[in-house]
Amino acid sequence: MVNWFSLTIQTPNLIRRISSKLRDCREMAAPISPFQIILGSSSIARRRILSEMGYKFTIMTADIDEKAIRKERPEELVMALAEAKVVVYEGTIREKPSNKDEARKFIKGYSGSHASVVSSVLITNLKTGTRKGGWEEAEVYFYDIPVEIIDNLIEEDVTFKVAGGLMLEHPLTLPLVEAVVGSTDTVMGLPKALTEKLMNDAL
């Protein structure tokens, strides 16, 4: 029998998760996994992180208006959206920029400053209905960000695809990151340790 696990991450993200048992099976060279994973996110970073964790998966995304769901606290918002990640700058929640002016304002604000990133994970065992969720926070400190870098990021449209216009792993952004307090995978949208824990808890 196949067990299905749904792991909701950043956009009502549905992921079906293999648990540590699958990893054990893989280590014993079992040819077929008893679990399947579905990632409900179009995020390239999340795909990469999940692959780095050793899982094979398919992708299923949901078409909703994320901005129609509102909460005051970032921790509540990410869980309500199952959107997995929002950026908090000077106490204000920042989601994906809606236009170039907003994107420019966001990125300029990070220059020589810092922002917090709050990521959530929600896992559902589709066989038992068990749901486990949690959130994690990290902080990113930036050097001064040159105007030409901001212009290039906006022209690439990269800032419109991520919460707060913040893409840590982008080659134009990464050299300008002074420090990350917390895990980089939290900033990128899928905290590995939290994901593993919740997957095991959902079994």
Image (tube, grey):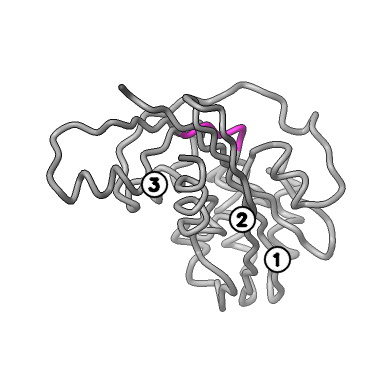
Percent position (x, y) of residue 124? 54, 33
In the rendered view, does 184 fall on the left or right side of 82?
left
Residue 115: image tag: 1
Residue to which mark 3 is pinned: 50
Q: What segment is highlighted magenta in the picture?
A: 11-15
Please tell me whether residue 168 is drawn above or below residue 85 in the rendered image.
Answer: below
Percent position (x, y) of residue 74? 77, 52
Q: CA distance from mark 1 to mark 3?
A: 24 Å
Q: Nearer the viewer, residue 12 or 87?
A: 12
Give residue 116's quadrant in the image. bottom right
Task: Say how many tags the image has.
Answer: 3
Residue extending farthest to the right is: 72
* Magenta span: chief secondary structure: loop
Q: CA distance from mark 3 to mark 2?
A: 20 Å
Q: Secondary structure at mark 1?
A: strand
Q: Residue at horizontal 41%, vertical 37%?
A: 17
In the rendered view, does 76 fall on the left or right side of 195?
right
Residue to which mark 2 is pinned: 166
Please tell me whether residue 50 is drawn above or below residue 124 in the rendered image.
Answer: below
